[in-house]
Image (spheres, rainbow, N blue to C red):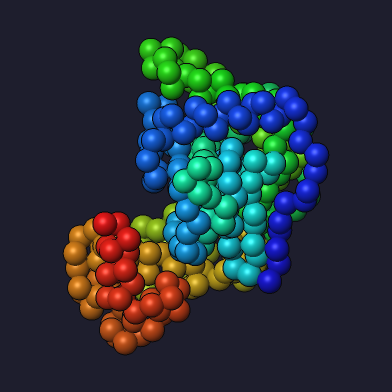
């Protein structure tokens, strides 16, 4: 297992002051545990008062800034630890297992999730003019970077707008643009630029992912995915695995199981019906693969989730 953990470094007083104010504002605007949408559409706030079990879920393109506590993100056999010193960038849709590892009622886990706008990334890239470096098509679509004062200042100004919704409509787009700029000009900005490049290898993989999302219940045809991505099947397979740490078949399997779980938890479907709807012909195969991903057979895992939810 590869552990992409944070390194222990001194915290600058200005950075700590920004973090403390952000933690206070996030806590006030997210008074209970869970994910809280905000009046700023691209911004969500997340709070948890206790460590969690590993929970597989689907991450969408976003910037995740932790202001209190710590969380693991597991992609394949790689563990990414993000905390107040390191933010997480997700540049394309990915099945990821998340686990909050540092949280308590007194010091809850607090995080901001900001949607990444690929069009804005490319617009800023054209204005900045710095070419993307390296072969981003062979880099992960998830990475950590060091949080610095300019980025945290822009995030803080965005969060302050939650107290003035009438101003947020005008000023939030400016703050969001600056946040994208700060990430692009940060230590790993060249990776985000390359990953969002129009018709670059990563965007071609992203097109294949979109097709998988739309047709996850259908039998997988790698040649059809490759045609949608304008790549050869062998090239798509290599690029796909480099970006997502899994093959297209493994990716599709996780999408199927995630959707079946949602159907059972939210819509009340029985396991056999949910498995059939997402493309499994064999209930035993569905139960076996579900247990492998979520740690328990469908009925038991869903019952446990409902008990935890009260």
Residue occupying image coordinates x 27% and y 75%: 299
Which image quadrant is residue 64 in? top right
- Above or below 198: residue 287: below
Question: Is residue 105 found left or right of 187 in the rendered image?
Answer: left
Which image quadrant is residue 254 in? bottom left
- Above or below 270: residue 262: above
Q: From where the camera sits, is residue 93 visible?
A: no
- Above or below 150: residue 220: below
> Which of 241/201 is in front?
241
Question: Is residue 89 found left or right of 133 in the rendered image?
Answer: left
x then y, percent, for residue 201:
63, 53
Number of labelled discs? 0
Question: Is residue 205 found left or right of 149 in the rendered image?
Answer: left
Question: Is residue 85 found left or right of 253 in the rendered image?
Answer: right
Residue occupying image coordinates x 67% and y 26%: 17
x then y, percent, for residue 178:
62, 24
> Which of 22/286 is in front?
22
Residue occupying image coordinates x 64% and y 46%: 83
What residue occupies the far front of the structure in this picture?
106
x then y, percent, for residue 248:
51, 69
* Quadrant placement of the C terminus: bottom left
* Quadrant placement of the N terminus: bottom right
x then y, percent, for residue 111:
52, 41
What residue occupies the far right of the structure in this picture?
10
> Which of 178/88 is in front?
88
Q: From where the camera sits, is residue 264 visible?
A: yes
Residue occupying image coordinates x 38% and y 64%: 258
């Amino acid at each position: 297992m590869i552990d992409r953990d944070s390194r222990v470094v001194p915290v600058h007083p200005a950075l700590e002051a920004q973090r403390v104010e952000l933690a206070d504002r996030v806590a006030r605007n997210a008074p209970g545990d869970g994910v809280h949408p905000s009046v700023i559409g691209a911004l969500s706030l997340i709070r948890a008062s206790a460590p969690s079990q590993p929970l597989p879920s689907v991450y969408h393109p976003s910037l995740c800034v932790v202001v209190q506590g710590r969380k693991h993100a597991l992609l394949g056999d790689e563990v990414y630890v993000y905390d107040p010193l390191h933010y997480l960038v997700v540049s394309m849709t990915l099945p990821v297992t998340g686990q909050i590892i540092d949280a308590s009622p007194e010091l809850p886990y607090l995080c901001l999730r900001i949607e990444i706008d690929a069009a804005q990334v490319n617009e800023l890239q054209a204005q900045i003019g710095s070419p993307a470096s390296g072969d981003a098509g062979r880099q992960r679509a998830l990475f950590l970077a060091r949080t610095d004062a300019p980025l945290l200042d822009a995030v803080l100004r965005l969060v302050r707008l939650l107290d003035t919704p009438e101003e947020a409509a005008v000023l939030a787009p400016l703050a969001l643009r600056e946040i994208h700029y700060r990430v692009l000009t940060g230590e790993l900005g060249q990776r985000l630029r390359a990953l969002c490049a129009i018709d670059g290898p990563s965007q071609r993989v992203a097109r294949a992912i979109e097709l998988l999302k739309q047709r996850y219940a259908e039998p997988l045809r790698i040649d059809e995915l490759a045609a949608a991505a304008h790549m050869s099947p062998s090239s798509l397979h290599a690029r796909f695995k480099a970006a997502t740490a899994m093959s297209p078949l493994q990716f599709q399997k996780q999408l199927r199981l995630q959707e079946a779980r949602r159907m059972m938890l939210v819509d009340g479907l029985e396991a056999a019906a949910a498995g059939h709807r997402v493309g499994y012909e064999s209930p035993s195969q569905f139960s076996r693969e579900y247990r492998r991903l979520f740690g328990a057979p469908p009925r038991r895992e869903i019952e446990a989730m409902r008990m935890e939810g009260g």
